[in-house]
Every structure is written in C-alpha cells, then in structure tokens.
Image (spheres, helix red, strand yellow):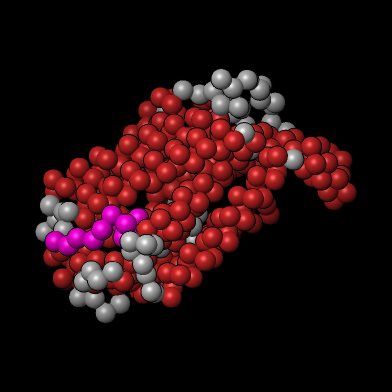
Amino acid sequence: MTKRSALRIARQWGAVLLGLAVSLVFLYVGLRGLELDDVWEGMRGVHLGWLTTGAAIYFFAVWGRTWRWHYLLRSIKPVPPGRLFPIVVIGYMGNNVYPFRAGEVIRAYVLRRDEQVSMSASLATILVERIFDGLVMLIFVFVALPFADFKERWLRDVVFFSTLLFWGAFLVFLIMALRPDQMRRLYTAVFDRLLPARLSEKAKGLADHFMQGLDNLRRPRDLIMTLVSSVFIWLTETTKYWFVMHAFNFEVSFFVLMVMTAVVNLATTLPSSPGYVGTFDTPGIKVLTAYGVRETVAASYTLVLHAALWLPITLLGFFFLYRKGLGWRDFARAREAVDGEALRQAPPVEREDTI
C-alpha cells in the first residue's frame, strides 16, 4: 500500500468516526430522559394511509430537484430531466448510505460517465443548489416568524449563524460568477506562484470548469428560476411533513412545520453518520417540543418522518444503481475521480447556447 493510499484510507475512517461521534451525541441529547417504550408505541400506532401519501408526495420534490439541476446544467450541457432523474436519486441514496454527503460526488461522477460533463463543473452547480437550499430555509424561518414565533435561544442562534453562512457563501459565489475575468486573473496568479508549472496548468483547467458551473448566477432570470424552483422543492417537502403529522395524534400549524423543515435541514449540514442520523432527529424533536408537542410524540413523529424520507429514495437509488451497472466500488471511484480531475485537466466541455 502506498503512502498516499494509506493517507486516503485514514482520512476516510477519520470522517466516518467523526460523523458517528456527532450522531451519537445528537441522539443522546434528543432521546435522553424519554421512555423509549412510549416512543415505540407511538411509532407503531402510525396511520399508514397518511404516511404512504406523504412518502409519495416527497417524489414531487425529487422531481423538482431534477428539474432545477437540469436548468443549472443548461449552460454546460443540456440534459433532459428524464435522464437526470435516476442520477439525482442515486445521489440522494449515496447521501443516505455514505458519510459526509458523498452522494453529491457520486452524482457528479455518474453524470460524467453518462453525459461527459466535467465533475468540477457539475459539482459547482450542486454547490449552487445547496446555497439556494440554505437561503430558502432562512426564508421559511422569516416568513413563519409572525405566525410561529419562537423564544428558544438555540433556535435563534441556529438562524443567526446560518444566515451569516449561507448569505456569505451566496455573495462569494455571485461575485465569482459576475467577475469571471478578475477571478481567472486571481487564481491564475495564485496557482502560478504557488504550484509547479505542470500542476498550475491543470489546476487552472479545473478552476475554469468550476467557473463554468457558476454561469447561471450571472443572469437575473436564472437566479429567479433557481430560487422559485427551490421554494417549490421545500414547500413540497414541508407538505410531506404535514401529511405524516396527520398519521399521529397531534397537530401544529404549517408555519411550525416550515420552521422544523428549515432547522432540521440546516442541522444536517453538520458532519454525521450516513443518513443524517441524530442531526435530523434531535433538532426536529426540539422544534416540536418548543411549540408544545409532547416530547415522546415529537420523537415518534420525527423518527418515522426520517424513515419515510430515507427508505423510499434509498431503495429506488439502489434500483437505479443496479440498472446502470454500478456498484459499491463506484463510490470509491467517484472520490478518486475528483482527485483525478485535480491532477489532470479534464477534456473541455463544449459550451452550448441556452434557450
């Protein structure tokens, strides 16, 4: 085994152990003091009609994510949503079974294999997706505040720091997209100064592809379409929360569920074990109890909701993985492909005019 391989394996195991530790801490905080028998009884008493309807509605949100990615990729290579849908599902399955959102890298890897799109360019569009997701979460909180005000200090802290993070990231990416010539001069000067000539040229090629993935941020119409599609995605997901809520014996307003959607999904940006164990569940339980839901009921609901989000798309993702002839080794290959693009300039992707 080479030194480089040993370091890569050590990093991977370090990531797994860190994620597991974070998940265990969150689960301890969320379930501490609860009667787990009561939580289990609440889960067993779920109304399957409401639950299955909620699970079905979630796939409208997945289709919305597919259309949004199709829209963001247009300036790189137009790919029909029907061809992107299996790739998106495989990516979300990867997030559910692999640590540190590795599904995003797998999604870019499968897109490169199927559609010959540079991984660095497609990863840039995925980063844009994540930034818009975070911005919509913050919009949800601020829209819901007049109807579902919260007094919990930790909730206010989450909103404050998330606002700084996502608005800061959005502004950085927007400046990069609006000032491409200046950015190229900047990273060209940095790479030429810090790297050997051979690596400098390859790093600049990688950065060029990444900048291409930010192309949609230059046009106001594309910004608006990305934002509108992101709002649709998360309103649809909140609607799933609403349907699953009716499978239990409690009720809160849709605005409270908007706050819950925002907080749990902001929390899942933290490192955790695969499937966001703990980082999804504990914030969900705490939000609902802050609005008066009994803690055992909140725990039963959040755990069932998490399973309903996790299981269907994971099973469908494995189905698409099998149909495309991919396997577990491709998860590792996806990581190696990112490193490979950093060491060699990928073939140039032909630009096509947008419609």
Taking depth in this image into account, of 223 and 129 the one nearest to the observer is 223
Q: Does residue 155 appear in the picture of this structure?
A: yes
Check residue 257 for magenta coloring.
yes
Residue drawn at point x = 83 percent, y = 48 percent: 190
Taking depth in this image into account, of 315 and 80 the one nearest to the observer is 80
Residue 259 to residue 105: above or below? below
Residue 324 to residue 163: above or below? above
Residue drawn at point x = 40 percent, y = 24 percent: 82
> How far across and down, in percent of the image, does residue 290 sit?
31, 71
Residue drawn at point x = 49 percent, y = 52 percent: 134
> How far across and down, in percent of the image, does residue 231 sit?
42, 44
> How far across and down, in percent of the image, does residue 289 sit?
28, 71
Would residue 25 be found to the left or right of residue 44 on screen? right
Residue drawn at point x = 30 percent, y = 77 percent: 32
> How far across and down, in percent of the image, does residue 73 sit?
55, 30
Q: Does residue 327 appear in the picture of this structure?
A: no
Give the extent of the magenta segment.
249-260
In the picture, the quarter occupied by the C terminus is: top right
Q: Kindly indicate the quadrant of the structure image that contains residue 275.
A: bottom left
Q: Kindly indicate the quadrant of the structure image that contains residue 335.
A: top right
Q: Disc count in the image?
A: 0
Extreme front residue here? 146
Check residue 156 for magenta coloring.
no
Would residue 99 be found to the left or right of residue 238 on screen? right
Q: Kindly indicate the quadrant of the structure image that contains residue 219.
A: top right
